[in-house]
Image (cartoon, rainbow, N blue to C red):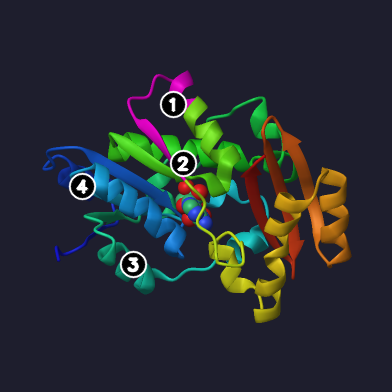
Amino acid sequence: MNKLLVLKTISDFKKYRSTLTGSVGFVPTMGALHAGHASLMQQSRTENAHTILSLFVNPTQFNDAKDLEKYPRTFEADLEIATENGVSAILCPDFNEMYPDEYTYSVMEKSFSKKLCGASRPGHFDGVLTVVMKLFNIVEPHKAYFGEKDYQQLQLIKNMVSAFFMPVEICAVKTLRENSGLALSSRNIRLSGEGKQKAALIYKAITESKTTEQAKTFLADHGFQVDYLEDIENRRFVAAFLEGIRLIDNVAK
Ligand code: AMP
């Protein structure tokens, strides 16, 4: 197994990047890696000569300081998962590396980013799009991998790439789920055992209810605080709180 390179500065990363030949696949993450992230790495590995992973808990996409503080951080375990899944190098910069401008410059989308997660988390997608554009400019990947788990994010990134003529192909990866239907998420670590079982009802609600109203009622009756549950075009989207943790999911209808 090749030794995994861990690069903390952009200048070190760029030196490394300049040595690579062949296609580069990129998997941006906020760490606390799980099998869902691993499926992105595996797809990249089969399609590229090199796979780069980034680990950066991006403060500008958190509108709630407590949520940022409580975001799980599991660096040593992340290194193991990256190694096992054929990652060549990890980029893990700190805030000052990523934001020398202190976030005075940002990328903003004016329409879809204001709906669903954007409606309840003001500025969230500005932070996401800004950090993804920065990462693309640093990593210069041929292909970048994003999960359908964050479908709104995936759509906004695809559209940003197209709007700014960015030379990268966005590849979508299906949502990986537990047998119960629960979508794997870094936030699941924070649920109690009972909470984790109950959280599977989110998938049941969005796949088995005829209407969004029925699905909302079902979740509320089981102790969830529903943030939104909406059908848009051919998909059903949900965000709901359980044990104070915000969980999201979506399915094709
Ligand atoms: P995050 O670390 O939560 O920012 O996620 C990094 C990437 O992994 C994003 O593109 C997510 O959509 C993707 N991802 C997270 N959970 C899953 C999952 N259960 N299945 C597939 N992809 C996922």
| Amino acid tagged 3 | Ile
Using the rendered view, name the quadrant where residue 223 is placed.
bottom right
The answer for how far apart the CA atoms under marks 2 and 1 are is 13 Å
Q: Which residue position holds label 3? A: 81
Which mark identifies residue 101?
none
Residue drawn at x 21%, y 50% is: 12
Which mark identifies residue 161?
1
| Amino acid tagged 4 | His
Q: Which residue position holds label 4? A: 50
**Can you tell which of label 2 and label 3 is closer to the viewer?**
3
Chain part drawn in magenta: 160-173
The answer for how far apart the CA atoms under marks 2 and 3 are is 23 Å
Q: Is residue 78 left or right of residue 188?
A: left
Q: Is residue 163 magenta?
A: yes
Which quarter shows the C terminus? top right
**Observer-nearest of 203 and 9:** 203
**Residue 182, position in %: x, y?**
61, 63
Crowd class of label 3 (few under 14; some 14 to 19; many from 20; radius 10 Å): some
Crowd class of label 1 (few under 14; some 14 to 19; many from 20; radius 10 Å): some
